[in-house]
Image (cartoon, helix red, strand yellow):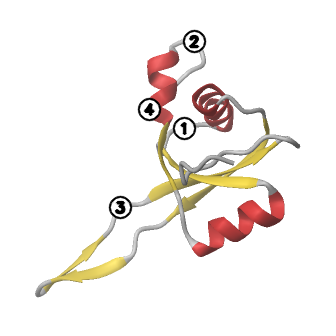
Amino acid sequence: MTADTLNKNNLYQVISAPVVSEKSTRTADKHRQVVFKVLPGATKGEIKRAVEMAFEVEVESVQVANVHGKVKRFGRSPGRRKDWKKAYVKLKEGHDIDFTGGQT
C-alpha cells in the first residue's frame, strides 16, 4: 500500500484487533503503549495514521514485530498457524485508549 492510494476506508482496515494479554497490559501500564494486530503489509506510517484517525489520539512512535505462527497438531495431521504482524503504538503524554468500555 502506498500513501497515495490510502483513503479513510483503507486506513480503518489496517488495524485488525487490539491484543489484550498480560504482556500487553503490562506494556500499557509501564510504557504508555497499546498493542494491535495489523495487516502484514502495513507500514509504521499507515499504522500511526490509522490509530490517530480511529481513536482520536496522538501517536508518539510505532514499533512493529512479525509474529511467526505456531506449529500445532490438527487431529492426526500436523499444521501451522498463520504468521501475523503486531504493532506497539506509543501514545503521547495525556492520551489513552480504553478497550474496556468503562467510563473514567
Question: Residue 74: image x %, image y %?
Answer: 17, 80
Q: Residues within 10 Å of mark 4 (few under 14, many from 20)?
A: few
How crowded pointer 2 is (Cα within 10 Å; few <14, some 14-19, many 20+) is rated as few
Secondary element type, mark 2: loop
Q: Is residue 22 left or right of residue 31?
A: left
Q: CA distance from mark 2 to mark 3?
A: 29 Å
Q: CA distance from mark 1 to mark 3?
A: 16 Å
What kind of residue is marked 4? Gln
Image coordinates of residue 35 in percent, x first then y, are 62, 55
Sequence-wise, the earlier of marks 1 and 3 is 1
Of tags 3 and 4, the one toward the viewer is 4
State which tag comes first along the sequence, 1 or 2: 2
Residue type beneath disc 2: Asp
Q: Earlier in the sequence, mark 2 or mark 3?
A: 2
> What amino acid is labelled 3 in the image?
Lys
Please tell me which residue is depicted at 53% across the width and 59% down the height of the picture. 19
Residue linked to disc 3: 82
Mark 1 surroundings within 10 Å by alpha-carbon count, few (fewer than 14), some (14 through 19), many (20 or more): some
Determine the secondary structure under disc 4.
helix
Q: Residue at x 52, y 53 (%)?
A: 85
Report the residue marked by disc 1: 42
